């Protein structure tokens, strides 16, 4: 006989027969997942262990996996809504099925599988490796679920953005500190892990798509470490929130209203209904550009094996599109500016990655409205495709990007033609000038040695880096739109107008004020970072190089005059913080830290002040 709390009328509002027990089991699953992940890290060398300890850690991973499966099965048996339970917990359902099926297959055919070195024997080692891989996948999926849950709670998008990058950097540092992430050190009997500051600096630079390095990527890190770096700047370029929403959209699940509102703010989309389409456009555009770019870049390494060529091409294509600037070569692309894969393919990836996904989405919708259903009248086409014109943002981004590319190319050629450093003038190839004009603002690759550039060229590059890419892109800086609004505001004031107008549109005063705020905060951050670098390094003769380094870090460009590996620990930490602030944006960081502003219900008398 059912108790009053278990009557049919009461049970219809409950999800489980034993809600408290289900809650405890969920907590047990979280503990088991965290335990397995930590055990996996320790087993792979985060801490030196004996063969017995390695064997015990493998057993702990497998037992944790089994406990997650058992807990999920019990919760399913208790569930009063089993069909919805399977849909809502598809990650753990899939995990349980793959674990049981895979473990059975491994147990039967382990003797035919490739040999894995370990103290536990062939069959057990394969079970440990298989369960470990599933645990890591489940941890990734659960992380996306947590990110989605926070997005659906209406938390400040700025806080989510800052927090997501902090989590990404922490995970990246953790992985890069594993001994297997570092290349074999000559003369060392056991694998050596990277120092904490080196791992932190590299993880921050990769997550913030900057490209500054303290150790050469191609020789200091192993293939595993290089892959971690590649994943970091791929995820960092698009953003964790975007990745999570992309995954939800791909598996066919609907985004919640509050989650959609949060993503709309992060992606700067005008309409709620655009978010899902924008996410799909980002996915298709990103991976299409990277795959095509990787295919075209394979010709850069004709003497390498096929596998190495594919990996090198994929690494540099993703790095270029995400404006990361990481390279596996010894000196980036120095001396290779005349190769079409460099001046055309690489620069093309950098440009399309830096114009912003909102611009790409707008261009896509305009193209669709122009070329689909050509027989439809213009009036009907406007009804079918409301967005049949270029938005003001798209126009400003395209014009400002083109102007900066032309100005950067001509400026580089002209400035390098003057003997400011007391040396004779020298010829500068147009291919070098074009490539550096592209990478000055966003990417961080180089085809010339920046330590040998004229001082005036370095100052010119600092200005270009400070401007950066466009809003909603993988690049940093104050953004081209902010620069455009500031210039337009100045022109309007000089003409005696009290507002900014462009192509028969009036730009809100609040946006113009925000642009000035971003520029002001950017200048403040760069100046403070430069001051600290000069203070910690005690080399005033390198003032320009320190300013160059600070601006490169803030704008997440990654160009350097060669002083990065020589920086002291305090200076490296300054650069780490500058890269982080530059990626999340000074305005976003202030919004995340500031409390909600209260509306003023009063006003003071107006009084003018002297301006000059």
Image (cartoon, rainbow, N blue to C red):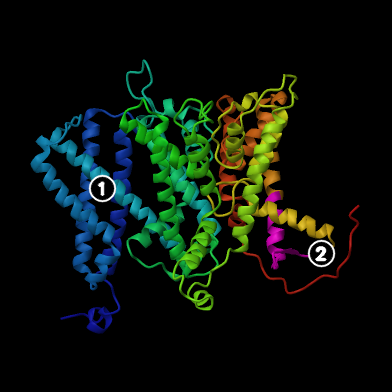
On the picture, is 611 further left or further right than 79?
Answer: right
Can you tell which mark lies on residue 134? 1
For image coordinates 53% across by 64% down, the residue present is 269
Do the CB atoms of the residues marked 1 and 2 lie less than 8 Å apart? no
- Numbered range of the magenta stretch: 497-519
Label 2 packing within 10 angstroms: few (<14), some (14-19), many (20+): few
Which corner quadrant of the image does residue 588 belong to? bottom right
The quadrant in which the N terminus is found is bottom left
Camera-side residue: 574 or 57? 574
Above or below for 310 versus 508 = above
Q: How far across and how far down the image is residue 179, in percent?
A: 36, 29
Above or below for 493 versus 103 = below
Can you tell which mark lies on residue 497? 2
Label 1 packing within 10 angstroms: few (<14), some (14-19), many (20+): some
- What's the distance in space between the residues labelled 1 and 2, CA to CA? 62 Å
Q: How far across and how far down the image is residue 75, in percent?
A: 23, 64
Above or below for 399 versus 405 = below
Q: Is residue 279 magenta?
A: no
For image coordinates 21% across by 68% down, the residue present is 78
Camera-side residue: 19 or 414? 414
Residue 153 at least partly seen: no
For image coordinates 69% across by 49% down, the residue present is 521
Q: How far across and how far down the image is residue 267, in percent?
A: 52, 59
Q: How far across and how far down the image is residue 509, in percent?
A: 72, 64
């Amino acid at each position: 006989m059912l108790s009053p709390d278990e009557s049919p009328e009461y049970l219809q509002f409950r999800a489980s027969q034993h809600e408290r027990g289900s809650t405890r089991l969920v907590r047990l699953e979280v503990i088991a997942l965290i335990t397995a992940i930590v055990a996996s890290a320790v087993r792979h060398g985060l801490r030196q262990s004996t063969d017995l300890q390695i064997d015990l850690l493998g057993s702990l991973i497998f037992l944790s996996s089994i406990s997650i499966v058992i807990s999920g099965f019990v919760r399913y048996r208790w569930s009063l809504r089993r069909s919805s339970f399977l849909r809502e917990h598809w990650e753990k359902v899939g995990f349980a099925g793959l674990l049981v099926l895979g473990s059975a297959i491994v147990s039967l055919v382990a003797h035919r599988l490739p040999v894995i070195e370990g103290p536990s024997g062939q069959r057990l080692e394969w079970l440990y490796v298989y369960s470990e891989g599933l645990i890591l996948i489940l941890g990734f999926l659960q992380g996306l679920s947590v990110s989605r849950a926070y997005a659906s709670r209406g938390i400040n998008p700025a806080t989510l953005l800052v927090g997501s990058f902090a989590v990404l950097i922490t995970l990246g540092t953790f992985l890069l500190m594993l001994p297997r992430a570092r290349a074999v050190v000559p003369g060392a009997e056991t694998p050596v892990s990277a120092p904490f500051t080196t791992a932190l600096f590299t993880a921050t630079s990769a997550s913030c798509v900057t490209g500054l390095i303290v150790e050469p990527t191609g020789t200091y890190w192993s293939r595993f470490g290089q892959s971690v770096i590649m994943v970091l700047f791929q995820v960092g370029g698009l953003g964790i929130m975007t990745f999570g929403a992309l995954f939800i959209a791909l598996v066919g699940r609907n985004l919640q209203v509050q989650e959609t509102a949060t993503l709309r703010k992060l992606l700067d989309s005008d309409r709620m209904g655009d978010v899902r389409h924008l996410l799909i456009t980002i996915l298709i555009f990103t991976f299409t550009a990277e795959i095509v770019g990787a295919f075209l870049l394979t010709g850069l390494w004709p003497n390498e094996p096929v596998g190495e060529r594919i990996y090198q091409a994929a690494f540099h294509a993703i790095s270029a599109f995400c404006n990361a600037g990481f390279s596996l070569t010894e000196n980036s692309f120095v001396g290779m500016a005349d190769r079409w894969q460099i001046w055309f393919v690489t620069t093309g990836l950098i440009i399309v990655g830096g114009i912003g996904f909102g611009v790409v989405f707008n261009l896509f919708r305009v193209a669709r409205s122009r070329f689909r259903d050509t027989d439809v009248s213009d009036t009907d086409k406007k009804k079918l495709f409301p967005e049949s014109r270029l938005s003001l943002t798209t126009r400003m981004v395209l014009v400002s990007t083109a102007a900066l590319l032309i100005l950067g190319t001509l400026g580089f050629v002209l400035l390098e033609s003057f003997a400011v450093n007391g040396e004779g003038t020298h010829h500068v190839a147009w291919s070098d000038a074009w490539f550096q004009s592209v990478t000055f603002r966003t990417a961080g690759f180089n085809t010339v040695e920046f330590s040998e550039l004229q001082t005036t060229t370095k100052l010119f590059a600092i200005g270009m880096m400070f401007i950066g890419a466009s809003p909603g892109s993988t690049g940093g800086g104050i953004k081209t739109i902010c620069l455009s609004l500031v210039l337009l505001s100045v022109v309007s004031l000089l003409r005696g107008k009290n507002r900014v107008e462009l192509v028969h549109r009036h730009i809100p005063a609040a946006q113009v004020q925000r642009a000035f705020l971003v520029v002001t905060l950017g200048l403040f951050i760069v100046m403070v970072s430069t001051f600290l670098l000069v203070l910690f390094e005690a080399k005033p003769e390198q003032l320009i190089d320190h300013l160059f380094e600070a601006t490169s870090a803030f704008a997440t460009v990654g160009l350097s005059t060669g002083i990065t590996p020589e920086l002291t620990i305090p200076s490296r930490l300054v650069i780490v913080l500058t890269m982080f602030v530059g990626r999340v944006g000074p305005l976003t960081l202030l919004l995340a830290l500031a409390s909600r502003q209260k509306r003023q219900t009063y006003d003071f008398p107006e009084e003018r002040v002297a301006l000059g």
